[in-house]
Image (tube, grey):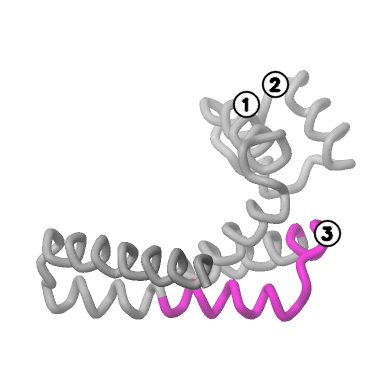
């Protein structure tokens, strides 16, 4: 279990020490809390809303029911709508789908990068043309 200082900090932050935090091996318990606290609860470059949507997407792609539940609740708390949650999971799904196609077919990564750069150059050009209209 974590040090007494970490246990106290977890209780103050979360209102309890969740059982899942008690199963973290001793050498990593304090450090694990620090990572969770700093990235999930701390002020970072991403807003709580953005972090929650990323968490939901990653959890869905990993097929983790624990993380999916946690990050959906986190997202709802951050004001994410049910429609936005569904869309985030769909985006994770299509990303996983196309990743499988690319990896399974051993598509050339350099070719993919070149094509992607060309696509976004085209989109930028289209947006610039629309702004000029």
Q: Give the residue at mark 2.
A: 3
Q: Residue at x 26, y 65 (%)?
A: 116
- The residues bearing labels 2 and 1 have C-alpha atoms spaced at a distance of 7 Å
Q: Are marks 2 and 1 in contact (CB under 8 Å)?
A: yes
Residue 110 left/right relative to 67:
left
Residue drawn at point x = 35 percent, y = 80 percent: 97
| Residue 82 image label | none
Which of the 4 image quarters holds residue 31? top right
Q: Is residue 133 above or below residue 37?
A: below
Q: Give the residue pinned by disc 1.
A: 30
Q: Residues within 10 Å of mark 3 (few under 14, many from 20)?
A: few
Quarter of the figure with the N terminus: top right
Q: What kind of element bears circle 3? A: helix
Q: Earlier in the sequence, mark 2 or mark 3?
A: 2
Q: What residue lies at 71% left-to-right and 66% top-to-bottom?
A: 72
Q: Residues within 10 Å of mark 2 (few under 14, many from 20)?
A: few
Residue depicted at x 34% and y 64%: 120
Q: What is the distance, in whole Å, between disc 3 and disc 1 at their CAs?
A: 26 Å
- Is 121 part of what is drawn in magenta? no
Q: Earlier in the sequence, mark 2 or mark 1?
A: 2
Q: Secondary structure at mark 2?
A: loop
Q: Quadrant of residue 76?
A: bottom right
Q: Nearer the viewer, residue 96 or 5?
A: 96
Magenta region: which residues?
Answer: 74-94
Q: In front: 87, or 34?
A: 87
């Amino acid at each position: 279990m974590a040090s007494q200082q970490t246990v106290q900090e977890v209780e103050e932050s979360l209102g309890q020490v969740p059982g899942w935090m008690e199963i973290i091996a001793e050498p990593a318990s304090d450090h694990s809390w620090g990572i969770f606290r700093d990235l999930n609860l701390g002020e970072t470059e991403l807003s709580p809303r953005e972090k929650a949507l990323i968490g939901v997407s990653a959890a869905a792609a990993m097929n983790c029911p624990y993380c999916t539940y946690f990050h959906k609740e986190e997202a709802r708390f951050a004001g994410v709508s049910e429609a936005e949650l569904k869309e985030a999971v769909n985006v994770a799904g299509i990303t996983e789908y196309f990743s499988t196609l690319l990896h399974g077919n051993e598509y050339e990564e350099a070719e993919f990068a070149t094509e992607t750069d060309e696509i976004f150059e085209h989109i930028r050009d289209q947006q610039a043309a629309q702004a000029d209209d």
